[in-house]
Image (spheres, rainbow, N blue to C red):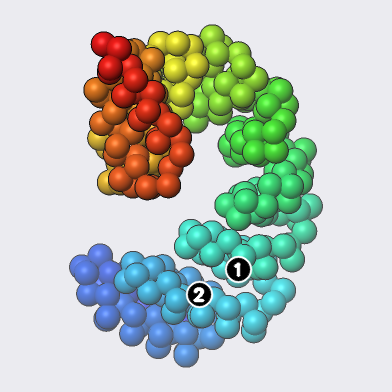
Amino acid sequence: MENKYFLEHKIKTAADFESAGKFLHALQIYKNLIEEFPDELDPYFNLVNLYEKLNNANAAGTLLKDLLEEHPDSLDIRLFTGQFFLRNKRWNDAIDILSIISPEEEPIVSFFLGYSHFMLNEFELAKVNFVNFIAVENKSELYHEALIYLAKIEIELGNFAKALELTSTALGIYSNNWELYLVTAIAFYNLGMFAHAVNSIYQALKLNEKDLSVNEWAGKIYFKSADYLKAEKFFLYVIEHQDEASPDIYNSIAEACLNSKKAEDALRYYQQALKLDPNNKKAYEGMKNAASLQNQN
């Protein structure tokens, strides 16, 4: 009992040091507690969190791997370690750590694994895990998130109608998510259903008008709908709010200008695309068309 009070007192003291910005003092206390109480997990976990505050994820990862090696059967340590690697975008490490846990024992592991595989562009593996998750966790707060990721995966796999089925289910549960409307718009776009795509991207813009991906897709969708002035507006927003816009976005805005008979603007944007990528055939051909239009004018 005395040891427990001593441990709690020391952890509180370290937390107070952290709050005061005295991180080295807190770090030393956690290290001392780990030496004195090697079977207590809180000092390890608190030290990991402190390492993250100090931008020393490597030390935190090493500490957790060593701890897990000593306690390979601890579900708490394995889950904590897996989530640490997820936070730090170490997807393969997260998969290695979490794949040992049975989804029946801890269903959220399927979500974590699905997300990790998704971030590695391993879409079939991601799909398996997200499907496993929604099969048992249809009441979870993460259920609609899993549906959105599954819809994204179906888009990556070219299954656009299936993606729409998933977003329709998700919209029935949660209709205030800009990303859900964006994914729906992308699916409609790829199916050639541009009027529906316009409605969906409009909703996405209402909920998140500053997101660059929403604006870029809005540009693409309005272009396909022959509303070239709106397409130009959205492409221009992306260009103005990116540190370094891609040649593709300059080609896209140039093409919108060309269709609006704004030859001079189109030429300028095609030139910018060629400046970024001198071998860009689309920009080269576009410049010829813009120059021809300019001569006609």
Above or below residue 214? Residue 197 is above
**Closer to the camera in the image, 204 or 32:** 204
Image quarter of residue 117? bottom right
| Percent x, y of residue 236 | 29, 28
Which residue position holds label 1?
A: 93
Front residue of 55 and 269: 269
Depth check, front residue: 145 or 236: 236
Q: Could you classify mark 2 by the number of other residues whose Cα lies within 10 Å: few (under 14), some (14-19), or many (20 or more)?
A: many
Which residue type does callout 2 highlight? Gly
What kind of element bears circle 1? helix
Comparing labels 1 and 2, the label whose residue is closer to the camera: 1
**Which residue lies under the disc numbered 2?**
61
Name the amino acid type tagged 1: Asp
Q: Dots 1 and 2: beta carbons under 8 Å?
A: yes
Q: Quadrant of the C terminus?
A: top left
Rendered view: 237 above or below 37: above
**Residue drawn 69% across the image and 33% down it:** 158
116 is higher (above) or lower (below) than 253: below
Q: Earlier in the sequence, mark 1 or mark 2?
A: 2
Image location of residue 91, percent across then percent down? 58, 61
Q: CA distance from mark 1 to mark 2?
A: 10 Å
Residue at position x 57%, y 21% in the image? 189
One can see residue 229 in this view = no
Question: Which residue is pictured at 65% across the width and 82% down the height?
Answer: 69
Q: Quadrant of residue 292?
A: top left
For the question of whether residue 53 can be seen, the reply is yes
Q: Tag 2, which secondary structure? A: helix
Q: Position of residue 62 (x, y in %)?
A: 51, 80
Is residue 231 shown left or right of residue 149? left
